[in-house]
Image: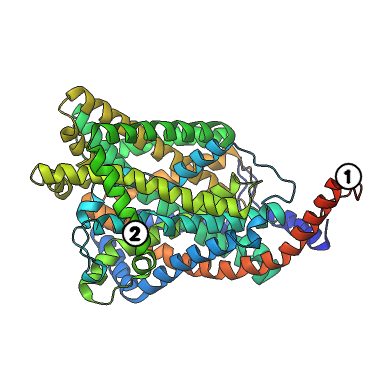
Amino acid sequence: MTMEKIKTDDLSRKLHARNFTKWGLDMNLFVSLVSALLVFGFIAFTITMPEQSAKIFGDINNYLNEHFNWLFVLTINAAFIFLILTGFSKFGRIRLGGFKAKPEYSNFAWYAMLFSAGIGIGIFFYGVAEPIYHLNIPEALRTGSPFDNFKIMYMHWGAHAWALYGLVAAGLGYFSYNKNLPFSFRSLFYPLIKDKIFGLWGDIIDTVAVLAVLFGLATSLGLGAQQINSGLNYVFGVPVNAIVQIILIVVITLIATLSVVSGIAKGIKFLSQANTIISSVLLLAILLIGPTAYILSTYLSSMGLYLREFFFVGMFTATTPDAMAWQGNWTIFYWAWWISWTPFVGTFIARISKGRTIKEIAIGTVILPTIIITFAMTILGAAGTYINEVNDGVIAAAINNDIATSMFEMFKYLSSSPIIQNVLSCMALIAIVLFFVTSSDSGSLVVDNLTSSGKKDSPRTQRVFWASMEGLIAIAVLLLGGKAALKTIQSAVIITGLPFAILLIIMMFSLIKELKVSYKQHEHNTIIKLKKNMHKISVDTEYK
């Protein structure tokens, strides 16, 4: 073990020794208390002054969109370029956990957990509606193609978003598994601020990460509760109101709590695999029952257009008032949403990626997810667009009335059989619930890591606390009701996403600085392995 590792191990022990360890908890008090106080303050403000909170957050949101839209665009494009260049360079051969490390999970289990954590409920919430919304986009983004709307949807859900996750996963996995640093966001900045990550600066970084996770996750949970309620109303006649949605959040949070208490290898892994199978069967059924040729043609044409204009649409930054309003409501919200999810999804992917190379992470979190998620959303979006065109705008009308009902309205016209309609609706509800649960349980696990100064295994009591906190945020926002609720939490996501965007840019410099040093060790181990295979040195010779 090198002197640097001995030193960081000692500092990590001292950091963990500062944790509060009574009443079944193991918390870094600064990170936990500051995060909890800010979250409770948000909840109290939202509940007691709904109109004022909506206006204040909305005003801040508008200001950030007007003055800092360029920062979000810069961050997400820089993350994509950085991860691809790093993954397919010589640094891509570096393995998380060391030269001899092996993957802990099968490829199917790895992808299932990756998708369940990374996609969230948005695919079903926006899949049908977004292509119809994007029939009206800024003039600068139009090419005259009938597939411009799908091109924009691919931009929002494709490679740019997933690159953020891969960047954080590769970085955190490297520093934690290869450098024995705490499994916490602070470790990403060790090459730049060194031992300060074990003090106040590290606490501040982890606090920002916790807030980003909680608000980003609560956005998805709030959307999910609305859509589950709409589905229950469509299938079983359950009334659509805030009380039902709050009950749904409470029940599903309880399920997620049971899952997170059981750990990754049991509850989270099982639910993620079940979710992947059910969602795949549902999407395949829609593809076969619906306008199959139209869906496949739309996907191929849209993907070609997306690839052709990849960098232009990705770097588009609005300057006129109308274009800025559109971009703020869509692209900037998405970029901020993905950025706020990076400490959650990136940390979770790092947690399940020990033994995989940086190149595997780049491919596994950018190329394959982009192909799969764009195809999945095309199945929903193209089917919805086709039905909307041949039925005089019925889907557009449903979207304008309540976006959460758009998918269930599509099922009504997808088949004339009430049995098929109800089966599809029930399958969709199960998939949404599972996405809901897997997002909540994996998010709770990540917050536990962050609030325990990077410990991989925190007490069960603590996992229960943070799972409950996520549900409380979603409930608090839903109490506002309707569009005001969604607008408030969207604004909160953008606000927490801004400082995190700055941290991500700094993190790229930090990671490349360390990888340059580490690659020399990788080259040494490669030579040692080659000499062992050629029987030129003893098989007992140790790797660095």
Res. 66 image quadrant: bottom left
- Which of the marked residues, 2 or 1, is nearer the chain's N terminus? 2
Residue 244 visible to an observer of this rendering: no
Of the pair 10 and 174, the residue shown nearer to us = 174
Task: Give how far across and how far down residue 399 sits, in percent.
Answer: 18, 48
Q: Secondary structure at mark 2?
A: helix
Q: CA distance from mark 2 to mark 1?
A: 51 Å
Query: Residue 539's mark?
Result: 1
Res. 251 image quadrant: top left
Instruction: Give the residue displayed 14% in from the left and 45% down from the top.
Output: 388
Query: Relative to 100, does residue 11 appear above or below in the rendering?
Result: below
Task: Give how far across and how far down residue 479 sits, in percent.
Answer: 27, 48
Q: Dot 2 corresponds to which residue?
A: 306
Instruction: Give the residue displayed 35% in from the left and 39% down from the top.
Output: 249
Amino acid type at mark 2:
Tyr
Of the pair 170 and 301, the residue shown nearer to us = 301
Instruction: Give the residue displayed 31% in from the left and 41% down from the top.
Output: 225
Color scheme of the displayed model: rainbow
Left or right position of 434 against 409: right
Q: Within 10 Å of the Cα at label 2, are there few (<14), some (14-19), or many (20+) other Cα atoms?
A: many
Query: Relative to 518, does residue 455 appear above or below in the rendering?
Result: above
Instruction: Give the residue displayed 43% in from the left and 71% down from the top.
Output: 74
- Residue contact between numbered discs 2 and 1, judged by CB atoms under 8 Å: no
Count of numbered labels shown in the rendering: 2
Query: Relative to 522, does residue 69 appear above or below in the rendering?
Result: below
Amino acid type at mark 1:
Val
Task: Give how far across and how far down residue 211 sits, in percent.
Answer: 46, 57
Left or right position of 481 against 176: left
| Picture quarter with the N terminus | bottom right
